[in-house]
Image (cartoon, rainbow, N blue to C red):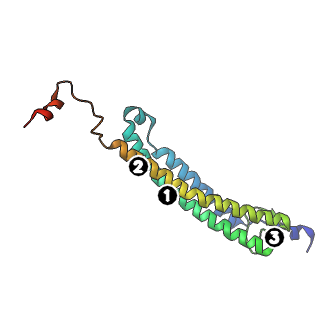
Amino acid sequence: MDEDTREFLEGDRATRLKVWGFAGVLLLLIVLNHLTAPDRGMFAANPVEALKKTADHLFYVVLAAVLLFVGASIYLLRLGVKVKRSGQYPPPGIRVAVRTKVLRGRRAQWNAVLAFVVAGILIVASPTLIYAWYSLSRLAAELSLPNKQIQPAPRNGAADLRRYTD
């Protein structure tokens, strides 16, 4: 084998199409998120209702993000383990989307560590997003409940009738 075929792994068309498909799905999710988000005029007219709709909308965004984060972290963990065991990046038997230089030794080990770190960040981000949604939905629920202690009394004195009725 000559040096070029040994040091580079050629890109695979099917893998390239999968990467483009994944990018297309992400773009579609971003466009759908933008189209279905509550409009800014609602925040000025009725902020509590807008917050409730934003919390409902955020649930679907968080659900999609968590599913993508979990899938990506599983893939990165598997990739990191394969790189660590084989001592080269990309590991033997893996298909790549574009022509990739084969790295060995310390540089390959750093790629494995990077895959583990990014997978860990994605794992930690998932519960953080879920907690952000939960907090926002609790806030919206608390703001939508009538607070009987702070309600102003009507000007005609009707609130005073409760004290004087027998």
- The residue at the far right in this view is 2
Left or right: residue 89 compared with residue 67: right
Which quadrant of the figure contains the N terminus? bottom right
Q: CA distance from mark 2 to mark 3?
A: 48 Å
Q: Residue furthest left?
A: 166
- What's the distance in space between the residues labelled 1 and 2, CA to CA? 17 Å
Identified at 49% across, 58% down, the residue is: 63
**What residue is disc 3 on?**
88
Camera-nearest residue between 115 and 159:
159
Q: Secondary structure at mark 1?
A: helix
Where is residue 92? Give x, y as percent. Answer: 78, 74
Mark 2: few/some/many CA within 10 Å (<14, 14-19, 20+): some
Residue 160 versus residue 104: which sits nearer the camera? 160
Of the image marks 1 and 2, the number of the one nearer the N terminus: 1
Q: Position of residue 29 (x, y in %)?
A: 53, 52
- Name which residue lies at 23% across and 29% down: 153
Does label 3 or label 1 sit earlier along the sequence?
1
Task: Find residue 21 and report its horizontal and vertical position in percent.
Answer: 61, 60
Q: Amino acid at mark 2?
A: Arg
Report if the CB atoms under discs 1 and 2 are less than 8 Å apart.
Answer: no
- Per the image, label 2 sits on a secondary structure element best described as helix
Q: Secondary structure at mark 3?
A: strand
- Give the residue type that dot 1 points to: Leu
Considering only order in the chain, which callout, 3 or 2, is on the residue closer to the N terminus?
A: 3
| Circles 2, 3 touching at the beta carbon (< 8 Å) | no
Up-down: is 162 above or below 89?
A: above
Q: Which residue is mark 2?
A: 138
Horizontal side of 32 relative to 21 (left or right) equals: left
Q: Quadrant of residue 142?
A: top left
Q: Which residue is mark 1?
A: 63
Q: Which label belongs to residue 37?
A: none
Res. 65 visible in picture: no
